């Protein structure tokens, strides 16, 4: 039982460190630097949007859909940070 608590604490500490690094890289560091968390979130958002855009045959409809990809990525990053923060509390 004690071993499980140590493993869970280590996973929690790793999640906290990754979240803190992600926030720092995204908001504080003045040059573009992407971390593992932002790459995973970006890949997931990209898969969803391109999967939906692939179904559309009309260029304008596809363009309208893909125009929302960047704002969706930002919202997904904020949600990821908040969820990681809540799981640590």
Image: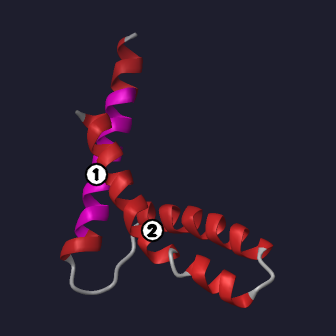
Q: Looking at this view, is 51 or 4 the one in front? A: 51
Q: Quadrant of the N terminus?
A: top left
The quadrant holding residue 60 is: bottom right
Q: Earlier in the sequence, mark 1 or mark 2?
A: 1
Q: Residues within 10 Å of mark 1 (few under 14, many from 20)?
A: few
Circle count: 2
What are the residue bounds of the magenta stretch?
A: 8-24
The residue wearing badge 1 is: 17
The residue wearing badge 2 is: 73
Asked if one can make out residue 6 in the rendered structure from this viewpoint, the answer is yes
Q: Is residue 17 magenta?
A: yes
Q: Is residue 29 left or right of residue 66?
A: left
Which of pointers 1 and 2 indicates the residue nearer the eye? 2
Above or below, comparing residue 46 to residue 88 in the picture: below
Q: Is residue 46 left or right of residue 3?
A: right
Name the residue located 27 percent from the left edge and 36 percent from the top edge: 88
Q: Looking at this view, is 6 or 53 the one in front? A: 53
């Amino acid at each position: 039982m004690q071993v499980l608590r140590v493993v869970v604490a280590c996973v929690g500490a790793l999640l906290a460190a990754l979240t803190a690094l992600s926030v720092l890289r995204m908001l504080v560091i003045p040059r573009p630097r992407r971390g593992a968390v932002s790459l995973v979130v970006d890949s997931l958002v990209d898969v969803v949007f391109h999967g939906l855009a692939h179904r559309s045959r009309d260029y304008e409809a596809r363009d309208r859909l893909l125009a929302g990809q960047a704002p969706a990525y930002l919202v997904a990053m904020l949600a990821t940070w908040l969820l990681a923060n809540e799981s640590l509390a």
